[in-house]
Image: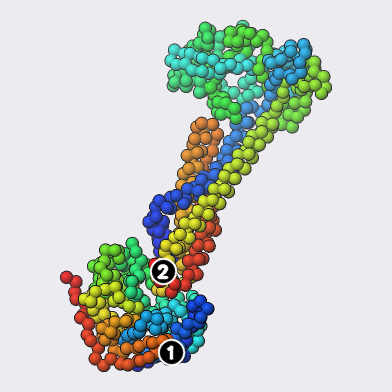
Amino acid sequence: MSALIRLHGVCKDYMSGPEVVHALVDVELEVGAGELVAVVGASGSGKSTLMNILGCLDRPTRGRYELAGIDVTERSTDQRALVRNRLIGFVFQGFNLLPRTTALENVELPLVYRGVSAKERFRRAAHALAQVGLADRAHHTPAQLSGGQQQRVAIARALVTSPPLLLADEPTGNLDTRTSHEVLGLLQELSEQHGITVMIVTHEADIAACTRRIITVRDGRIFRDEPNAEPRIAEPAPSRP
Amino acid sequence: MSALVTSLRMAVRAMVRQRLRSLLTSVGISIGVAAVVLVAALGTGARGEIDKQIQSLGSNVIFVFSQPATKSGAKSRANMGMGLTERDAEAIRREATAVTAVTVYSEVSAQVMSELGNGKIGVMGVDESYFEVRGYEVATGRRFNESEAQTKAKVALIAPTAQQKLFGNQDPVGRWVRVGKHPFRIIGTLRSKGQSPFEDQDDRILIPIGTWRSRVVPTLGDRVQLVMASAKSAEHSGEAERQVKQILMQRHQIAEGEEPDFRVGTQQEFQKMQEGIFTVLTVLLLSVAAISLLVGGVGVMNIMLVGVTERTREIGIRMAIGAKPADIQAQFLLESIALTLFGGFAGIGLATGLMLAFARELGFPMQLSGQAVAVALGTSAAIGLTFGFWPARRAAHLDPIEALRHE
């Protein structure tokens, strides 16, 4: 497996009042294409900072970050926006869909910033929604959808650009157990059947157990990084009742 | 192109979502734009129209009004008030070489009746030269002739507005009207001369001056309200004015440097006066425009800043999925331009209403021109761009991580 993500000596410091906080210290990490990885750790461990750097939302203070062979460490703001648009899909804990905007339009949004024609946007967004089993909810607004459905719309939005990397920050944090498993099943499927690298930040061991590799972050360092030989199979997403 | 259409749709939708807020914010812009449209309309339409009205007074006309002398004394008192007489007019006709025609008139507003209607109408006593000097043309029938003027015949010509009041759509020629206790026979109708800067020139009947003096206002002797003289040409009007002044000074026995009991005015002076009114009006409207556009613009800026704060999370989401700072900036700029353009359209509507009201109430003709619309929309867009710039820039420079965390 060729490495999609390469972190080399990555440090992140920031000022908290007069004190310097070392959020990440000398992180070395390689993640291959198609891997399904959990990043676990207590709050304040540095896992969110790690995800922000992996998502090109933040820059490391020192060290180097290569994504798909591109050194993205010292890129300009515009170029990093481009990297996020082309190479990364985001799924957030709070879903982060635009309110009063239909599911279809939410899914189309990344393509708007790529300058794709309206017709093509519609085609691809409809396809992505079908992939997450929500073709029949295309014209519903987030307020008209359940939490699980909203999160699946968010996954469709992350998928619509066919990125090699999907970053999910506590994707099941706002969902009940049953719905959590639906969403996890979907993420497993994306990794296994579509070769997308999926990284899930979570503090729940239960969720982490569904992945193939578990990275534990503690005090800004990678404390443990071990494969999970027998991942639990999350229930496959059931067809809509 | 498709991205622009999409962004425009997003901008309009954001505006529609906050209907009340958008409406209130654009009120200031509307007033400012309305003022701009009125200035443009004054510049293009009304100025030319008023010039035309002044031309309609006649060609190269010199007006002589009587005015009470400020000095006391027996000599002045004799000339007080209606100091001009028909003999003054004759003297000008005889002696002023730069003048081609001289006429006199007196007018009184009186209740005039016909068998079909009645109304308050100007009754003018005029001599035969009046038609040339003022450029009145006969539409149907005829003018009164010399013998009718000399015999003080009770004949009248009627102008369109008065005709409408007294006869509706009936042909008035040959019919009768009554002024006081005297019946007058209508012998002709006049073509419309339209609005002058002072009055409706079509709301009157014209009768021989001799008849006017003996039948309508018999107390004035041979005094007249106004003497009008036509200069030979525009170039001669200065000379004609001097000659008229000199003749009257002599006849009224007024020494050099003394306050005369009359005032001489030319068409050019009216034009200058009108220009003055335009300048004042333009400056006034431009001040209104500047103030309301500034205040409105600040309002737009304020509401855009509120919008940026409220939608911080949305901005974070957009950035995370690949919006560049320039995309965010363009989005908010388009929103503020959509807002001010909405205000601009409302302003054009407001200005159109005002112009109609002006035209009807004050006889002040103004028209909405394509140029005015272009200026109005250009101004609104520029205001949106100017006052939306800083909020949009602020939105564009948000940190995506902070923005995503915003609650």
The label on residue B322 is none
Q: Nearer the viewer, residue B83 or A206?
A: A206
Crowding near pointer 2: few (<14 within 10 Å), some, many (20+)? some
Give residue B406's mark: 2
Q: Secondary structure at mark 2?
A: loop
Q: Secondary structure at mark 1?
A: strand
User: What amino acid is labelled 2 in the image?
Assistant: His
Percent coordinates x, y for residue A142 in the rendering: 30, 65
Q: Position of residue B130 (x, y in %)?
A: 64, 20
Q: Residue B270: name its quadrant.
A: top right
Which residue is at a point 52% across and 47% down the rendered structure image?
A: B33
Specify the label residue A27 is tagged with: 1
Q: Which chain does tag 1 point to?
A: A
Q: Is residue B395 above or below residue B27?
A: below
**Furthest-right residue in view?**
B256
Answer with the quarter of the image where residue B49 lies. Answer: top right
Q: Residues within 10 Å of mark 1 (few under 14, many from 20)?
A: some
Same subunit, tags 2 and 1? no
